Amino acid sequence: MTFTVRAPAKINLHLGVGAPREDGFHPLLTVYQAVGICDDVTASRSAGWSLGVSVPDWMDADLVPVTGDNIVDRAARLLADHHGIDAKAEVSIAKTIPIAGGMAGGSADAAAALVALDRLWGVETSDEDLLRIAAELGSDVPFALIGGTALGTGRGELVEPVADDETWWWVAVVNPEGMSTPAVYRHFDELNPDADPQPPDADDLLAAVAAGDVHGLAATLRNDLQEAAFDLRPDLSDVIDLGHREGALRGIVSGSGPTCVFLADSADSARAVATAFTEDGHDIVMVTHGPVAGAHVVTYV
Ligand code: ATP
């Protein structure tokens, strides 16, 4: 039996960041949205453990660790330990989500691996246990399991679905050179030595989502890491400016960057904005939409 599980990239419609907690993590109040840029994880039976990665032409495969340090290795070990079994499987990751792009690609792979291995091993992990194991793997992994649009609190790992009946159109402008999430948070701390321990709320944005109001959503998008990302990579503010000139309702840095995402008022406008970026020499530009489903089985063979 072989299972292929697909898991989505995330964007943060709101990323409110508070002063670091005693454990070093930053308290977050975030609104996640899963978008249609996805990685697939395929797991089949095997006498041992192996992991392979395939990437599209524009991605550098060497940036993905495959020597036991991949987040999928850790996901397999945690799930196997939870059930007291050996982690045996042949696993491959087919990546599309930019690496170190602020779209939580590694977290998507971990979530997809948990679902694929749970099915392959027939261990029927409860939703509660799967979400707990996901949270141990990383702050964004529980969201990659549930998908849709969701409120994230704690360090982002406590997720609660948000009703969202709309289809929102996005353009993602990918930067070939990734950014380190810890470095961006460190710079946030330098820029905000007096940050409030309580991250800012997302009430206005949540009201715009509930009302299906694309202009309201554009006006309330917020990323507290954006200033730090601009400081570390000044070219990103030029990308945002170009999107605004070309008709996007609003552009923001995705998570810790460097991917920039632009909200458009229709599929056609999203395509027009994407074309403008391509003509400006940006090689990796994707039109996508959200919300989409969290990690789910796409094929059984
Ligand atoms: P974050 O969730 O911190 O916003 P990101 O989306 O910016 O992360 P990822 O693509 O998840 O970035 O990768 C961050 C780092 O994790 C990479 O630089 C890589 O070294 C490591 N990594 C481990 N496993 C994976 C994986 N399956 N795919 C991509 N990167 C991985």
Image (cartoon, rainbow, N blue to C red):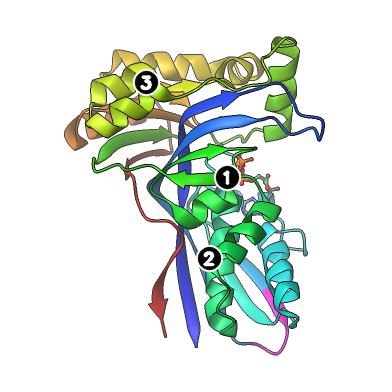
Q: Residue drawn at (53%, 63%), measured in percent from left and top?
A: 112
Q: Earlier in the sequence, mark 2 or mark 3?
A: 2
Give the residues in magenta.
46-50
Tell me the element at label 1.
strand
Name which residue type carries label 1.
Answer: Leu
Residue 243 drawn in magenta: no
Q: Is residue 49 magenta?
A: yes
Image point (44%, 63%), residue name: 6
Q: Position of residue 143 (x, y in %)?
A: 51, 49
**Residue under pointer 2:** 127
Q: Residue furthest right?
A: 22
User: Is 111 placed left or right of 160 in the picture?
Assistant: right
Q: Position of residue 161 (x, y in %)?
A: 42, 46
* Residue behind mark 1: 158
Q: CA distance from mark 2 to mark 3?
A: 31 Å
In the drawing, what numbered circle is on residue 204? 3
Answer left or right for 84 relative to 166: right
Neighbor class of circle 3 (other Cα within 10 Å; few <14, some 14-19, many 20+) is: some
Whether residue 199 sits left or right of residue 204 in the image: it is right
- Residue 93 visible, this orientation: no
Count of numbered tags: 3
Confirm if mark 2 falls within 8 A of ligand 1.
no
> In the rendered view, would you say 300 is above or below 257?
below
Of callouts 3 and 1, which one flags the residue occurring earlier in the amino acid sequence?
1
- Quarter of the figure with residue 68: bottom right
